[in-house]
Amino acid sequence: MREAIMAEFSGGLNSGVEEGARPFFRELSRIIGFTDSSTVWWSALVLVCIVLLIPFSLVAVPPIDDYPNHLARMFVEAFGARDQYLSKMYAVHWRIVPNLAIDAVLPMLMRFLPINIAGRMMLALSLLLPFLGVVTYNYVAFRRRSAWPLAASLIAYNTLFLMGFMNYLIGLGAALFAASGWVAWRQRHVLLTTAFMSVAATLIFFIHIFGLLFLAALIGGWELDWVLRSGGGVVAMLRRAAWSIGIGAAVFFPSAVLYMLSPLSQHSDRMVWNGLWAKLPGMFVLFLGYDDVVGRLVGVLFFVFIYICDRQRLYRSAPGTMISLLVIFVAYMVCPADYEAAFIDVRFPIMLGLVLFAGFAPVRSPNLASAAVAAAFSLILVVRVGTIADVWYHHNRDLAELRYTLDPVPPGSRVLIVAVQPSDNPAYWRNVPRGRLIPGFSRIDYNLPGLLITEHRGFWPLLFSAVGKQPIVVLPPYRRISLPEGVLPDYHLLQHPIPYPGPAVAPYLWRWRSNFDYVLVLDAGGADWGAGFLPGKLAPLRRTDAGALFRVLPLKIDPGAPGAGGHR
């Protein structure tokens, strides 16, 4: 009897709680977008965008790896030709390069806006454009608004965004918008759509080559799905396949010609492959950020959620979505990790994530579960953006320290940058500010010395100037002490004789005392140099945790000494 009474009481209590919670979750469901109300949906979209942009208001130069280097290059493109120092170091040389989005826009913005504001505007575009492309594609594919594409905001601050792959992300966003036009108009206006898409594909080629590949995967998946589903027998299917191949060739033929004319078409021996087991952790680039544990936890929860939705058939997919996912996944599995550029293969998981949000829609009507899921996604978004905002705000300390350290550098100076590596001092690197690395993936402060160009008009060896990637060249005699791309050498290398032509990682180290005016040791708080660093060769000027600056002392050469000439 007692058990029966308790069971009845418990059941009544649970029922009462559920009945009391139902209006709350119903209202929450209405607010976050499980409705066709355009006002509510648009309000939610604007709110999500505002939340994503909050960190940009907290720091002038965000802790994003390639970004300071890109900003320095844009500064040279905007003002270098008229600057008495930079004009002797660099020149702009336009060519067919599928990596030009920010180069075409940002220098123009810099002429009207402060460079750090213009730079953050372009950086914000690379953050928002893929997200807005997902929202647009999802609406065009399903002809209704839902909260699911808004959840793509969870992967906006992905690893490659924090690495500074701006053109790549802008290219993916542009591809989603172009593919939306294909889905909307292809059946009704095939010739006009093909002509429009040919122009769009050509523009996307110049934005970034991976944007073009993404567009091909989206359009190709849609076309193959149309060929297979339209029926009519084998002959009709072959006719449709020939038609699809023809219009596909028309869309991508101009881009193919441009590729053959570009430096990228040349064979490269630079290729690195990772094993298949290394591909699984690569899927977490959708979520990895400054906090490794939180990123992986969010990733696991997300993939479990996708698995449950698949098992319960809680979704429907847009035409061609499954084919596009399969093509992108296979490309990820077979792609090298490094070919002409770094982190090639991990660019494909970003595409997979965008397709997951763009090409699927929930099928269940609003209920407690859907509202709870939406609430959980909203909470995760707030936590993720809050974490980013905290890191960016505290990055101001690193910026202030580095600016203070570099303050004595006069315009036109040649500055050699070396660094304290994680292997030099593991204990130090376990406790560095979070804005200096992505745990388990990469350190992201390598390019912060780009401030030398934007704020001191000085020279440093690693400004991005690769022939097939950037429209800029280093002029003689600076060319022989530069690399078009690379990593910072270990500061210990300066303590030993440098053989010709120098270490593979930095051949410009040979005769470094003759070629450079200053030496900056990045992350100097982890250096171990006792009473001093190369006394008699370097004069200490300033030192902070973020960096230490030394002036290179003049060489004292004994003309009668063997090997005189100063190659250290």
Image (cartoon, rainbow, N blue to C red):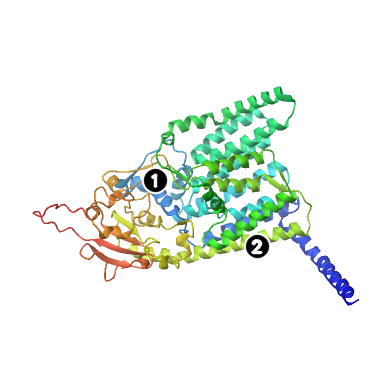
Q: Which residue is at the far left? A: 560
Q: Estimate the x, y position of residue 128 in percent, counting from the top left.
A: 57, 51
The residue located at (30%, 47%) in the rendering is 89
Q: Which residue is mark 1?
A: 77
Between 55 and 312, the one nearer to me in the picture: 312
Residue 424 percent across, percent down from the top left: 36, 63
Judge from the rendering whether residue 157 lies leftward or rightward of residue 301; answer left or right. Answer: left
Whether 195 is drawn above or below 350: the answer is above
Q: Element under label 2?
A: helix
Mark 1 element type? helix
Which residue sits at x=60%, y=56%?
299
What amino acid is at disc 2? Leu
Which quadrant holds the N terminus? Answer: bottom right
Q: Which labelled disc corresponds to residue 114?
A: none
Compare residues 396 and 371 and report the one nearer the observer. 371
- The residues bearing labels 2 and 1 have C-alpha atoms spaced at a distance of 42 Å
Q: Quadrant of residue 184?
A: top right
Q: What is the number of the mark on residue 379?
A: 2
Residue 239's place in the image compared with 548, above or below, is: above
Q: Residue placed at 52% from the left, 48% from the top? A: 346
Asked if residue 146 can be seen in this view, the reply is: no
Work out whether 409 lies above or below 177: below
